[in-house]
């Protein structure tokens, strides 16, 4: 872990407000008026003074400016313009969803940032034209905090982890929490040592009770790159960057924004005596937390309904959504003092990968990701079930294999979970309407990675069982393999497409209008993808997610607890 060194003088102190322009500029020695001097008679200084032209007189009130008169200074820039000049960086998880910082304090802030080289686990590019996956890791490290929060010697594990996925077109984002007590395998992990060498930490295969996900960080010297690799193994999603925050980060960031509004469905009074207890004491209804109280809010679990980590995740999602709203509020963006506090606290509290290590890179990333509307940022939790290997009290969970794959697929395909709830009525319109008689359906069938011989089997089924006589086998798809089954049809073939979709039990997301040869007697194109299970067997909608996946949204206030 590297941290840039700065000088003994805080660079922030070198910036001063110019009262004439309204801008901040670097303090110069000339800002301190020199002591008056008397030129020597007959000397060079006297001659220079004599050669200086007299200053132009000020124009008379209400009169025109005389030729050669000094040009007046530009008017002060508007408050909005100055705010835009200040706005640049990000903080913690909010660093990925809000726009803050101060480029005027670039050198100061740049010196605050700590980095970890995760090698091939991440991306070296701060921005991308593709989808972006960032892992936000809240560590429970107590190093330097004393016994106040429990084990004072703990190096920290992945106590709170959120996979933040931003769609390629930046139209939506999904923040998926990963339970720390989920039993999962951890892959081998190359880690860079202080002397520059690389040591591979052996992975741990999944057993009945171990390892838990939180052991992907800290355990046996694992760095954040190990957590990134573990998440990729679980979800199939490559991770580009990580942002690591500790206890102090929660305290300083919540204070810098002036407190984070939260709301509880019932009072919380955590009286747990050991170091794991949060000692949170909040009444039912709306509250505002910052500093120690904010940390207690995101840590508490003993006083919640089930006293579990899953309950705590609900509080954390509310806290982060509220932080995003607070970050984007006018009170924060229009106050240079708050912006500096925020940027300074963020850069001091965060550790990131070398791909985004530095204010310039973080600024580029923030500007890119800030294009996502908070209304389209959805919080959810990786679907899990109680560990079946445990009897009685369940301390661990495992991935829910019936629900999780659909969620992973939706995230991979940039499906907005916000829009998914509203989608069926509009999307299913492609399936509604008249259907052509099977004898009028014309289609060529291609195999693009489905079952071996799938095109021929489907052809025979269509002709012999469904009466689709105008069907042919196109063989292997010319475009190579594809994950999804698709049906492309022309503008005049909608009734044929609806008829074939009903036979094949295709979801609306598989239909692609206007992409086949035009004309009612042209062939539609049915391409069987990797999701194809056999003739007549239903395909899952590629744009759908399970109805009971929990969701909350960054633009909506809600009470939890």
Image (tube, rainbow, N blue to C red):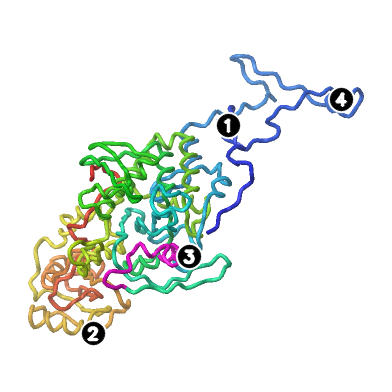
Residue highlighted by disc 2: 452
Magenta region includes residue 80: no
Q: Residue at x 18, y 58 (%)?
A: 427
Earlier-in-chain disc, 1 versus 3: 1
Residue nearest the observer in this picture, 141 or 65:
141
Structural crowding at the residue carrying mark 1, measured as other residues with C-alpha within 10 Å and reported as few (<14), some (14–19) or many (≥20): few
Q: Is 499 on the left or on the right of 328, as rendered? A: left
Return the x and y of residue 15 as percentages of the image width and height. 60, 36
User: Callout 2: few (<14), some (14-19), or many (20+) C-alpha neighbours within 10 Å?
Assistant: few
Q: In terms of secondary structure, where does tag 4 sit?
A: helix
Tell me: residue 216, above or below residue 532: above
Q: Which residues are magenta?
A: 206-226
Closer to the camera: disc 1 or disc 4?
A: 1
Residue receiving disc 1? 17
Q: Nearer the viewer, mark 3 or mark 4?
A: 3
Q: CA distance from mark 3 to mark 2?
A: 40 Å
176 or 215, which is in the foreground?
Answer: 215
Label 3 residue SS: loop
Q: Which residue is mark 3?
A: 118
**Residue 532 position in % (x across, y down):** 21, 75
Q: Nearer the viewer, mark 3 or mark 2?
A: 3
Q: Residue at x 32, y 65 (%)?
A: 212
C-alpha gap between disc 2 and disc 4: 98 Å
Q: Secondary structure at mark 2?
A: loop
Badges 3 and 2: C-beta atoms under 8 Å apart?
no
Q: Quadrant of residue 530?
A: bottom left
């Amino acid at each position: 872990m590297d941290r840039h060194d700065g000088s003994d003088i805080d660079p922030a102190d070198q910036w001063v407000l110019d009262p004439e322009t309204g801008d901040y500029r670097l303090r110069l020695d000339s800002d301190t008026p020199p002591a008056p001097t008397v030129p020597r008679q007959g000397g060079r200084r006297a001659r220079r003074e004599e050669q200086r032209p007299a200053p132009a007189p000020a124009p008379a009130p209400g009169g025109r400016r005389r030729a050669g008169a000094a040009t007046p200074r530009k008017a002060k820039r508007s408050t909005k313009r100055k705010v835009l000049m200040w706005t640049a960086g990000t903080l913690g998880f909010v660093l990925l969803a809000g726009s803050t910082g101060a480029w005027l304090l670039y050198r100061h802030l740049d010196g605050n940032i700590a980095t970890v080289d995760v090698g091939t686990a991440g991306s070296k590019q701060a921005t991308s034209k593709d989808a972006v996956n960032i892992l936000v890791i809240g560590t429970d490290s107590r190093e330097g905090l004393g016994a106040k929060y429990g084990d004072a010697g703990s190096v920290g594990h992945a106590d709170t982890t959120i996979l933040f996925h931003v769609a390629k077109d930046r139209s939506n984002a999904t923040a998926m929490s990963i339970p720390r007590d989920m039993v999962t395998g951890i892959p081998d992990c190359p880690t860079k040592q202080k002397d520059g060498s690389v040591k591979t930490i052996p992975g741990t295969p999944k057993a009945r009770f171990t390892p838990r996900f939180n052991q992907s960080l800290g355990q046996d010297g694992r760095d954040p790159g190990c957590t990134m690799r573990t998440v990729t193994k679980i979800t199939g999603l490559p991770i580009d960057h990580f942002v690591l925050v500790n206890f102090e980060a929660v305290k300083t960031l919540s204070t810098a924004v002036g407190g984070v509004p939260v709301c509880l469905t019932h009072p919380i009074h955590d009286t747990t005596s050991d170091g794991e207890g949060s000692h949170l004491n909040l009444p039912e209804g709306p509250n505002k937390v910052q500093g120690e109280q904010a940390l207690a809010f995101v840590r508490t679990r003993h006083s919640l309904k089930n006293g579990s980590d899953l309950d705590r995740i609900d509080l954390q999602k509310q806290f982060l959504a509220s932080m995003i709203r607070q970050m984007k509020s006018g009170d924060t963006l229009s106050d240079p003092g708050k912006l500096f506090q925020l940027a300074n606290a963020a850069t001091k509290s965060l550790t990131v990968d070398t791909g985004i290590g530095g204010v310039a890179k973080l600024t580029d990333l923030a500007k890119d990701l800030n294009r996502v509307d908070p209304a389209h940022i959805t919080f959810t939790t990786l679907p899990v079930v109680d560990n079946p290997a445990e009897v009685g009290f369940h301390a661990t969970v495992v991935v829910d294999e019936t629900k999780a794959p659909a969620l992973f697929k939706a995230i991979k395909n940039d499906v907005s979970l916000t829009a998914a709830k509203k989608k069926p009525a509009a999307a299913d319109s492609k399936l509604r309407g008249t259907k052509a008689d099977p004898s009028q359906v014309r289609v060529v069938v291609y195999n693009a990675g489905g079952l071996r011989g799938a095109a021929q089997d489907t052809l025979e089924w269509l002709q012999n069982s469904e009466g689709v006589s105008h069907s042919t086998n196109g063989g292997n798809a010319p475009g190579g393999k594809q994950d999804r089954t698709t049906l492309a049809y022309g503008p005049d073939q909608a009734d044929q497409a609806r008829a074939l979709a009903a036979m094949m039990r295709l979801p609306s997301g598989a239909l692609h209008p206007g992409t086949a040869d035009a004309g009612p007697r042209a062939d539609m194109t049915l391409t069987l993808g990797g999701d194809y299970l056999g003739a007549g067997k239903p395909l899952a909608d590629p744009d759908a997610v399970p109805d009971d996946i929990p969701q909350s949204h960054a633009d909506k206030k809600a009470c939890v607890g």
